Image (cartoon, coloured by chain):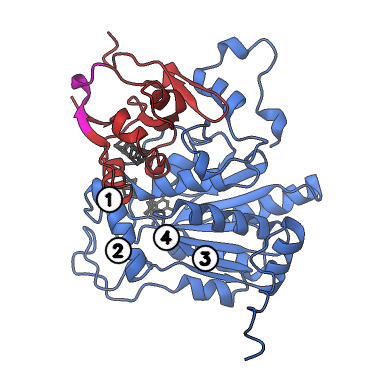
């Protein structure tokens, strides 16, 4: 098992600064979704991790903790994550993306 | 090398992998994308085998977003870590022998001008510090003296990362590395000064912990190289493996190094300023209006 980044939608959407999307070294790994925040009643969207592309470096954790000062990202063992975003289930729209969450274990 | 190659051949759409379909439909080709939209569009860069948390990877990711016309851009690289990612992108990548990248890019950029005339086709070299300042040094300097019109980007991790930690000309004096156990005996080479002496029209240093700045210097460098002359960007892109930087501290290191010895610097000739202002509407080089009241004093 290995660690991946996990973003708490409620903590992120209260700030939604998008900093981590600009600092993750991997392309299209931290994505942004308007719906994710709005579904929970926030004005803005949330960042989320396409876990199949995450290399587990935790740079995003440092960025969210120290630059955004929002502590929304934690590293978590992938088998402890019941639902997550995977590249295959992400669709792009004009200014955002939509992710249908699924079990990362493929169940 | 045009929008024509970034589309589906008729009948093939349903057979293409998701990443390809996303690239055609939601990629940056023919649109102006910026770092502020990251996470909302499909990027040129794909998955690649560079190490987790590598700052060079982040820099390459940002650079590709900053290319002013990705559909009209060719990258040139050489041996070293960077090519492992640069080659995994939806734009053409040319790879030769170690150190010949600025020679290859010279021929390529001249050939593209002959073939396409005034239509801009951008050539961007991205190579390591070893590839640029040691092995490729002669070809790099000569391309600048000849004022070849393309951009050279040094991915400066201050070590030969790909081959396990030998010192390069860009390693700092005293640095101890796996394959330089006694510490480097000489100073870091001043490639910035050499670029200016050799006649580059634009020379800048950046660190990837400021994505908007990376975007801004790369855009300027690529645009200036279209007509004015050679441009050079030197980017601090730490090797967390050879310098044993924990991956969650890579941006902290970038910040410290930026404050210590890699401050942002930008040199631009008057001709390049005028070109950016007149051709691309840049406002930052216009004479500043005198502050009210100051002239009376
Ligand atoms: C002619 C030649 N000599 C040696 C090598 C082996 N080699 C591959 S990468 C590399 C060092 C790369 O260092 P640098 O250019 O600083 O890039 P980095 O890997 O640090 O990004 C060397 C020596 C080679 N590929 N070709
Ligand atoms: S840095 Fe933190 S608060 Fe900002 S978008 Fe990312 S997870 Fe949300
Ligand atoms: S852990 Fe690293 S690779 Fe994974 S999302 Fe965070 S910054 Fe990106
Ligand atoms: S060896 Fe160093 S420079 Fe190369 S990919 Fe790994 S961390 Fe990056």
> To which residue does mark 3 refer?
B204
Residue at 44% across, 36% down: A27
Mark-to-mark CA distance, 1 and 2? 14 Å
The blue chain is B
> To which residue does mark 4 refer?
B129
Which of the 4 image quadrants contains residue B65?
top right
Disc 1 is placed on an element classified as helix
Disc 4 is placed on an element classified as helix
CB-based contact (under 8 Å), mark 2 and mark 4: no
Say whether disc 2 or disc 3 marks the residue closer to the N-terminus: 3
The red chain is A
Instruction: Say which quadrant the C terminus of chain B sits in.
Output: bottom right
Say which chain tag 1 marks: A
Q: Nearer the viewer, mark 4 or mark 3?
A: 3
Mark-to-mark CA distance, 1 and 3? 27 Å
Report the residue that reaches farthest toward the bottom.
B297
Is the residue indicated by label 1 positioned so its CB lies within 8 Å of ligand 2?
Answer: no
Circle 1 residues within 10 Å: few <14, some 14–19, many ≥20:
few
């Amino acid at each position: 098992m290995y660690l991946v980044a996990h973003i708490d939608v409620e903590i992120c959407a209260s700030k939604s600064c998008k900093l981590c999307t600009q600092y993750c070294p991997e392309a299209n790994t931290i994505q942004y979704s308007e719906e994710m925040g709005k579904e929970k009643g926030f004005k803005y969207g949330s960042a989320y991790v396409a876990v199949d592309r995450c290399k587990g470096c935790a740079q995003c954790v440092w960025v969210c903790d120290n630059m955004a000062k929002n502590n929304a990202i934690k590293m978590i063992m992938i088998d402890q994550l019941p639902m997550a975003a995977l590249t295959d289930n992400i669709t792009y729209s004009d200014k955002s993306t939509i992710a249908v969450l699924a079990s990362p274990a493929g169940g | 090398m045009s929008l024509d190659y970034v589309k589906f051949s008729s009948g093939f759409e349903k057979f293409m992998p998701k990443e390809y379909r996303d690239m055609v439909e939601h990629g940056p080709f023919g649109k102006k994308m910026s770092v502020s939209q990251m996470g909302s569009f499909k990027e040129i860069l794909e998955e690649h085998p560079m190490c987790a948390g590598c700052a060079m990877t982040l820099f390459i990711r940002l650079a590709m977003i900053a290319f002013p016309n990705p559909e009209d851009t060719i990258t040139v690289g050489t041996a070293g870590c960077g090519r492992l990612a640069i080659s995994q992108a939806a734009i053409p990548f040319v790879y030769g022998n170690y150190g010949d990248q600025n020679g290859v890019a010279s021929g390529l950029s001249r050939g593209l001008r002959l073939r396409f005339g005034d239509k801009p086709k951008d050539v961007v070299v991205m190579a390591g510090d070893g590839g640029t300042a040691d092995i490729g040094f002669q070809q790099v300097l000569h391309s600048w003296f000849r004022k070849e019109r393309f951009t050279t980007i040094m991915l400066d991790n201050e070590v030969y990362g790909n081959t396990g930690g030998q010192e390069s000309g860009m390693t700092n004096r005293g640095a101890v590395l796996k394959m330089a156990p006694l510490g480097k005996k000489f100073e870091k080479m001043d490639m910035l000064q050499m670029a200016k002496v050799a006649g580059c029209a634009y020379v800048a240093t950046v660190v990837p912990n400021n994505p908007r700045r990376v975007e801004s210097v790369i855009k300027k460098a690529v645009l200036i190289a279209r007509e004015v002359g050679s441009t050079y960007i030197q980017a601090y892109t730490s090797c967390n493996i050879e310098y044993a930087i924990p991956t969650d501290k890579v941006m902290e290191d970038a910040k410290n190094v930026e404050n210590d010895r890699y401050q942002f610097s930008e040199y631009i000739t008057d001709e390049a300023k005028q070109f950016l202002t007149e051709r691309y509407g840049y406002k930052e080089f216009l004479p500043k209006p005198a502050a009210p009241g100051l002239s009376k004093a």
